[in-house]
Structure formats: C-alpha cells, structure tokens
Image: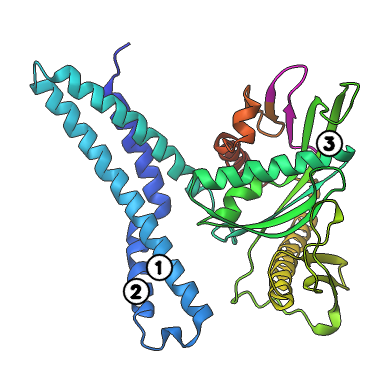
Amino acid sequence: MAIDFPVQIERLRHTYASIAAVTDPDALRARIVELSESAAAPDLWDDPDAAQVVTSALSHAQADLKRVEELGERIDDLGTMVELAGEEGDDAAEILAEAEADLAAISKDLADLEIRTLLSGEYDQRDAVVTIRSGAGGVDAADFAEMLLRMYTRWAERHDYAVKVLNTSYAEEAGLKSVTFEVHAPYAYGTLSVEGGTHRLVRISPFDNQGRRQTSFAAVEVIPLIESTDHIDVPETDIRIDVFRSSGPGGQSVNTTDSAVRITHLPTGLVVSMQDEKSQIQNRAAAMRVLQSRLLLLKQQEEDAKKKELAGDIKASWGDQMRSYVLNPYQMVKDLRTNYEVGNPDSVFDGDIDGFIDAGIRWRKQQEQTED
C-alpha cells in the first residue's frame, strides 16, 4: 500500500508541535545564554563541583535544543522531498523510497523525544544508581541477578552510556548476591526508574541435575545520584563505618588490605558496602555518595506518602512482581504493569529493553494523571 505522505507529514508536524510546547525551545535558548555566561566566569573552576554542575547543565541544554531544532528541520526537508518527487518523473520512485526511509527514522526519533518530555520528575535528569539483589530461588536467583546486570550494561552500551560498578557481592556457587553500579547519562534516573521492582525468571535450571523448571526472583532498585547541591546532611554520630578486605567470587580474597568499606546509617538501618575502588578513602567516598542518594530518595518517598495519606489514597503504586522472563515452557518476556511483551528473551537479556522502558514511562505518566 502506497504511503499517504501528506497525511503522515501532517501527523509528524502535530506530534512535533506537542513536543515543542513541552520542551519550549525559547526557554531552552534563554537558559543556554544564562548558563553560558556562568560558564564564562573567570572564577568558575574555583569550585570544581559547582563548575561541573554548570558545564554539565549547559551541555545537556544545548543537546536538547539541537535535538528539537534538527527534528523540525528534518520534517520540513521531508515535505520538500515529497514535493520534489511530484515534479520528477523518472526519479520519483527513488526519491519516494528515500522519503519513506526518512519518514520511518523521523517517526522513531520523535517517539524517543516524546518519551523524554514525559520525564519531568524532580530528579529525572540525574544519573542513576542501580542495585540488583538476588531473591528467592537459591543459585538460580544469583545467576538471574548476574543476567540482569549484563542486560542493563548491554543496554547502556547500545546507547553509549558510561557504567561504573561500585560494589559486587558474589554468590558462593555462581552469580551475584548483589551489585551496585552507576549509569551516567542525561535522564538516566528518570529512564531507568521504571525498571525498579521485582523481576521473575522461569526456566529449566542449569544447576538442577534433574532438569526441573525453576522460578527465581531478583530485586532491582534505582535511585538518583546525589549532587553536591542536594545538602543531605549525614552527621558522623548517625553512621557506623566498618572496614574489611575485598573478596572475589566464592569468597576468594582479592585484596590484602582492609580497603572495603561498609557504612550503616543508624537511624534508618540503611547499609551500603563498597569494595570496587582501589583505596579505603575512595570506597568510603563512594559509599557515602550512595547512602546520601538513598536518603534523598527516602525523603522524597516519605513526602509523597504523606501527600497520599492526606489525600486519602495510600495504595501502593508498584506490585511485588513487575516483569516475568519465561524461557520454558514457552519463550516470552512480559511486563505485568503495561502488558508490553516480546517473544525473544535472548534479545532482551542482550540489552534490547527500550520497548519495556518506553511503555513503563508512558504507564507511569498515566498513573500520575489518574491520581491527580
């Protein structure tokens, strides 16, 4: 069936207008001017942390504006190309084939940008700190936790996002008890926060010599990375710091000095361990950063819970099980909140999870609108 280009281009223009209304290019330009002036200040790097915040914000604003402006130009170019095809007799088919490819590419990029406009939470622009913990299911659960780590790191690689592993706790037989890592990218927290929850794996266990089907679970926690401007005070009297030797798979010691650090936040009972940095000082700094991030999120959750209580609505937003990965007796990965599913678990475990993330972001926005 031939593509009705005028109808499709009008659809693109309508979607683009909605996105532009949210992103507000004029406001972005004004912010870029303001940030550029701050970045040009001669004393900017007197405070390296503050300078990093300014330069990072400027880079992100410039990238956002460029993305919006270029999409508008591409839609205009597509319209011009289609008009040209109507004037070219012999070359019309070739031009329309190129226009069809451009239409598909623009539609995808618009959909991606539309998702970005839904990330308007207070911390959505932040880098993310992700923790994966094995749950019920014994060695299969530990193996599942390691599979999820690979899934998220492969997803990050697909998008050229930097990942830094902060702490790894290996299980005795195989897999991981837990792992914590940072994802450094614009809107990493807003994007990955919909991955938080309980994940379930159903498969024939490779660790069962009788070849029985096994169900195992892993928990994924996503929190925003703390910034120097957040002012989350953690008094020394509120924490206990323990040091120990880092260990590798199976409990094997990989460090002959007490460089690993465990920080316990006494008022809340939160515990953060770090061992992947080379020195005790670096591990302590990384552990404090993650602890502050968790305290920041806890504070936000308490405020949100109080608002819901005052409004008479205290039902949970997330179920105990948000996604199932089934490898036997059939092959399917399904999100139980959005009903988004695919029939190729191998591609999902290889990092192809954008469909799940996009569906989750849209679902969350719908939930928020329903609650409002």
Lower position in the chain sequence, tag 3 or tag 2: 2
Q: Nearer the viewer, residue 74 or 290?
A: 290
Q: Position of residue 369 (x, y in %)?
A: 61, 44
Quarter placement of the N terminus: top left
- Position of 33 with respect to 189 (left or right) is left
Can you identify the residue that label 3 sits on? Answer: 140
Q: Do the residues under discs 3 and 2 have CB atoms within 8 angstroms?
A: no
- SS type, badge 2: helix
Residue count near mark 3 (Cα–Cα under 10 Å), binned few <14, some 14–19, many ≥20: many
* Cβ atoms under marks 1 and 2 closer than 8 Å: yes
For disc 2, the marked residue is 36
Hey, which quadrant is residue 90 in on the image? top left
- Residue at 8% x, 22% y: name it: 87
Stretch in magenta: 320-332
* Structural crowding at the residue carrying mark 1, measured as other residues with C-alpha within 10 Å and reported as few (<14), some (14–19) or many (≥20): many
Q: For numbered disc 3, what is the local secondary structure?
A: helix
Q: Secondary structure at mark 1?
A: helix
Q: Earlier in the sequence, mark 1 or mark 3?
A: 1
Residue located beneath label 1 in the image: 58
Kind of residue at badge 2: Ser
Q: Is residue 38 above or below residue 356?
A: below
What's the residue at 70%, 42% (across, down)? 148
How far is disc 3 from disc 2 in space, using C-alphas?
A: 52 Å
**Of the pair 135 and 57, the residue shown nearer to us:** 135
Please check the rendered image and state whether residue 337 is part of the magenta-colored stretch, yes or no. Answer: no
Tell me residue 273's x, y (percent): 79, 65
Q: Can residue 345 be seen here?
A: yes
| Predominant SS along the magenta part | loop
Given the image, on which type of amino acid does mark 3 rest?
Answer: Asp
Instruction: Give the Cα distance between marks 1 and 3.
Output: 45 Å
| Residue 320 visible here | no
In this orientation, which residue lies closer to the viewer: 40 or 143? 143
